[in-house]
Image (cartoon, rainbow, N blue to C red):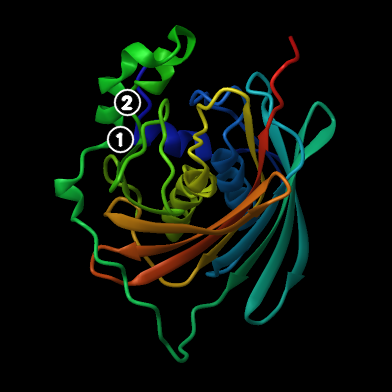
Amino acid sequence: MAYTAEHLLQLLNLEPLEVNIYRGQNRDIGTARVFGGQVLAQGLVAARRTVDDERDAHSLHGYFILPGDLEAPIVYFVDRLRDGKSFATRRVTAIQHGRAIFNMSASFHVAEPGPEHQEPMPAVPPPESVEPELDLIRGIADRIPESLRAVLTQDRPLDFRPVDPVDPFSPSARPPLKYMWVRAQGRLPDETLSHQAVLAYASDYGLLATALLPHALSIRTPGLQVATLDHAVWFHRPFRADEWLLIAMDSPAAYGARGFARASVFTRDGRLVASLAQEGLTRVRAEPRA
């Protein structure tokens, strides 16, 4: 079954249940649990729905507490912590089966002028010269477990194009650096929230895997347990998620079964529009005793 940009927008269009309470549905992308980017993006949408004036998100800080159940909807409770003249602050708690699975703080800011600077965008091949990840995955479909093959090879709402792709079934050690182009497959609405939510969704795709690169590991390595623990997004400038964005990722540290990764997000013309940071579990399970 195809998974289109329209389906993604429907996934992010939460159902209001009561004042400050919303319900979201889930989509299986082959992770065996609710995709963290989905929860992050839905939490952003829930928070923004409670901000009454024209303020856009400038930062999100989320903690993943429990794995999400794909078979149960997620209910989002929003606390309106503060509405100031320039900033609005919200706290979001995501609930399944009566327990918190995720919480997030989000801050929204009125647009205003100020000093500007940014780091330069790295020199990478343009997206047209890079093979779509979906084509790469379909090329090794015979190596994918049959139970996952259909969902991993289905059409996607986002076109991910890794500049130097990794073989997930036979990774080799390399420096913890990764570059990936991404854009939505199709035109998105003009409202800022749609583009911020889609980037929040995409921001959890492949970021933590950067911390695995020096160790010749991938998320498909047998015995490896990978899970996002916390995730932050800062939005610096306006952008469109239906136009090419470059996510430049690196991982400065890994220790104690935790990997840390960060990223800068650039438009095609070199504007730095967002920054990402994530820490996650990277636990290598001991081999069972004979």
Q: Which residue is mark 2?
A: 137
Q: Residue at x 41, y 48 (%)?
A: 174
Q: Can residue 19 be seen here?
A: no
Residue 185 at x, y percent in the picture: 28, 39
Horizontal placement of 10 versus 103: left or right?
left
In the displayed structure, 38 sits above or below 198; it is above
Residue 57 at x, y percent in the picture: 56, 65
* Callout 2 secondary element: helix
The foreground one among 14 and 69 is 69
Assess disc 2: are there few (<14), some (14-19) or many (≥20) residues with their C-alpha within 10 Å of its C-alpha.
some
| Amino acid residing under circle 2 | Ile
Quadrant in the picture for the C terminus = top right
Marks 2 and 1 sit apart, C-alpha to C-alpha, by 6 Å
Quadrant in which residue 146 is drawn: top left
Assess disc 1: are there few (<14), some (14-19) or many (≥20) residues with their C-alpha within 10 Å of its C-alpha.
some
Residue 197 at x, y percent in the picture: 49, 50
Q: Which residue is mark 1?
A: 133
* Callout 1 secondary element: helix
| Amino acid residing under circle 1 | Glu
Q: Can residue 180 be seen here?
A: yes
* Callout 2–callout 1 Cβ contact below 8 Å: yes
Q: Residue at x 62, y 24 (%)?
A: 223
Of the numbered discs in the image, which one, if any, rests on residue 76? none
In the displayed structure, 52 sits above or below 216; it is below
Residue 211 at x, y percent in the picture: 54, 49
Q: Residue at x 47, y 72 (%)?
A: 236
In the displayed structure, 201 sits above or below 224; it is below
